[in-house]
C-alpha cells in the first residue's frame, strides 16, 4: 500500500475501498470526513478565491457542458484577451472584498505566443497586489510551464472533468492523456495543481469514483480539488441532462475529503443552484474553499454578500493565505477592516471570540 505514514496520505485507493466510502450511512460518512478535515485544517475556515474570465468564448474544444465552446450556440458574448490593467483593477477589487487568490481563466486550446506575454504580466501584477495567482489556459508546453513558474504563478487549474471511461462522451477534441501530460508538466515546474471535475453530467457513480481515484493517484495530491456541479446552459448538449441527487453530490465531497485529506476541496461551479442548507452540508463534508463573486467565468455565482451572510450564520471565517508577506497580510487585513466598516457585510467570527 502506498501511504505517506506521517500525514496518512494514500495514493492507491482501490475501487472497492472508494465504493465502501460511498456506501457508508450518510451521517457516518460526514462524521468521518469532518474528523479528517479537522485533523488537517482549522475548523470553520474556508479559503476564498475570485475567478475572472480573461478571454471569453470561441474555444475550439468541444466540452459538452461548456457555453464557451465554439461548437455550440449559447449566445454568449465573446471577448478577446482582457487588457492587463483591467484585470489588475478587478484583482484589486477582489482583494478588497476578502479574496486571497485571484484566478484567471482563458477559453483556449493552448495559449498563443502572441497572448502569452500579457498573461505573464497579469500574473506578476496579481502577485504584486499580495494575492495568490492561478490561471487556466488549456494545454501547456514544457516551456510555457517553466515561464509561468518563473513569474511565480502559484496554481495552475486544469480539470480532469470525469473518469477516463466517461471522458470520451464529454470531450472529443482533447484526450485524457493530454490533460494528464499538462498536469505533470505543471507539477514538474513546481507550480501547485488545481484539478478536479464536474458532477451531474449523466455519469454513473463509478465515474465519480474513477475521477477521485485518478486525482488521488497524483503524487502529491493536487493542492486544490474543485468539485463542480454541472450548470446546465441552454444551447449546450448538456442543457437537459438529469439532475444529480444533492446527497450524492455531498457524498462526493466527503469522499474527496477523506481520500485527499490535505487538499483544499473547493465547492465550485453550481453553488448558485444550491440552497444554504446544502452548502452547509458541503462544508460539513469537508469543502473548505469557494469561488466568491457574482460570476463564475460565464455562469452566475451567489452574490458576494450572500456568501458572507451564510458564513456569518455558520460561524465560518475566511482563510488567510500563508503565501502573503507580513506586509501584504497587514495591508489585506486593514483593507478588510475598512471594508467591514464601510458596508458591514464582512463577518469575522474570531472578532467575537
Ligand atoms: S471547458 Fe475550457 S477547454 Fe472546454 S470548451 Fe470550455 S473553455 Fe474550452
Image (tube, rainbow, N blue to C red):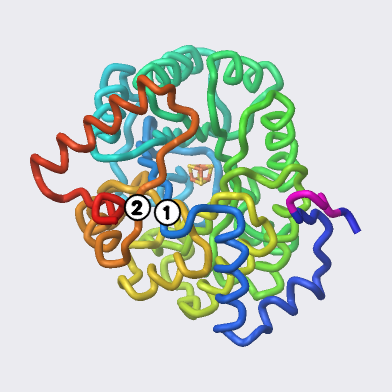
**Between residues 327 and 269, which one lies in front from this camera angle?**
327
Residue for point 57% across, 20% down: 148
Q: Any magenta on residue 159?
A: no
Secondary structure under badge 2? strand
Residue at image location 61% in from the left, 78% down from the top: 29
The circle on residue 45 is 1
Task: Say which quadrant the C terminus sits in.
Answer: bottom left
- Name the foreground residue: 131 vs 229: 131
Which quarter of the picture shows residue 312?
Answer: bottom left
| Residue to which mark 2 is pinned | 317
Q: Earlier in the sequence, mark 2 or mark 1?
A: 1
Q: Residues within 10 Å of mark 1 (few under 14, many from 20)?
A: some
Rendered location of residue 137, percent (x, y): 52, 32
Q: Secondary structure at mark 1?
A: strand
Q: Residue at x 65, y 56 (%)?
A: 261
Range drawn in magenta: 3-7
Q: In this view, which residue lies farthest toward the front?
A: 353
Question: Residue extending furthest left?
Answer: 342
At 74% from the left and 62% from the top, the residue drawn is 165
**314 relative to 135, above or below:** below
Numbered label tally: 2
Amino acid at each position: 500500500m502506498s501511504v505517506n505514514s506521517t500525514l496518512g496520505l494514500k495514493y492507491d485507493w482501490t475501487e472497492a475501498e472508494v465504493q465502501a466510502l460511498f456506501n457508508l450511512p450518510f451521517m457516518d460518512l460526514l462524521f468521518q470526513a469532518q474528523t479528517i478535515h479537522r485533523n488537517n485544517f482549522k475548523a470553520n475556515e474556508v479559503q476564498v478565491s475570485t475567478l475572472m474570465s480573461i478571454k471569453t468564448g470561441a474555444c475550439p474544444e468541444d466540452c459538452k457542458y461548456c457555453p464557451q465552446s465554439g461548437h455550440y450556440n449559447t449566445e454568449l458574448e465573446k471577448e478577446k484577451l482582457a487588457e492587463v490593467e483591467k484585470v489588475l483593477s478587478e484583482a484589486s477589487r477582489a482583494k478588497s472584498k476578502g479574496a486571497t487568490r485571484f484566478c484567471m481563466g482563458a477559453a483556449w486550446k493552448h495559449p498563443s505566443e502572441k497572448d502569452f506575454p500579457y498573461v505573464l504580466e497579469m500574473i506578476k501584477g496579481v502577485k504584486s497586489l499580495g494575492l495568490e495567482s492561478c490561471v487556466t489556459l488549456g494545454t501547456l508546453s514544457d516551456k510555457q510551464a517553466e515561464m509561468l513558474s518563473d513569474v511565480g504563478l502559484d496554481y495552475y487549474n486544469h480539470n480532469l472533468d470525469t473518469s477516463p471511461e466517461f471522458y470520451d462522451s464529454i470531450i472529443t477534441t482533447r484526450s485524457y492523456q493530454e490533460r494528464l501530460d499538462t498536469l505533470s508538466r505543471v507539477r514538474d515546474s513546481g507550480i501547485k495543481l488545481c484539478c478536479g471535475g464536474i458532477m451531474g453530467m449523466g455519469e454513473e457513480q463509478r465515474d465519480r469514483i474513477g475521477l477521485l481515484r485518478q486525482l488521488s493517484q497524483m503524487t502529491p495530491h493536487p493542492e486544490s480539488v474543485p468539485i463542480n456541479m454541472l450548470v446546465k446552459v441552454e444551447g449546450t448538449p448538456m442543457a437537459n441532462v438529469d439532475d444529480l441527487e444533492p446527497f450524492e453530490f455531498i457524498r462526493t465531497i466527503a469522499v474527496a475529503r477523506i481520500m485527499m485529506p490535505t487538499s483544499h476541496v473547493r465547492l465550485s461551479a453550481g453553488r448558485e443552484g444550491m440552497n444554504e442548507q446544502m452548502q452547509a452540508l458541503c462544508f460539513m463534508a469537508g469543502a473548505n474553499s469557494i469561488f466568491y463573486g457574482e460570476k463564475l467565468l460565464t455562469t452566475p455565482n451567489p452574490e458576494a454578500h450572500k456568501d458572507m451572510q451564510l458564513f456569518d450564520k455558520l460561524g465560518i471565517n475566511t482563510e488567510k493565505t500563508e503565501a502573503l508577506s507580513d506586509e501584504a497580510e497587514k495591508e489585506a487585513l486593514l483593507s478588510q477592516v475598512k471594508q467591514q466598516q464601510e458596508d458591514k457585510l464582512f463577518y469575522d467570527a474570531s472578532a467575537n471570540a
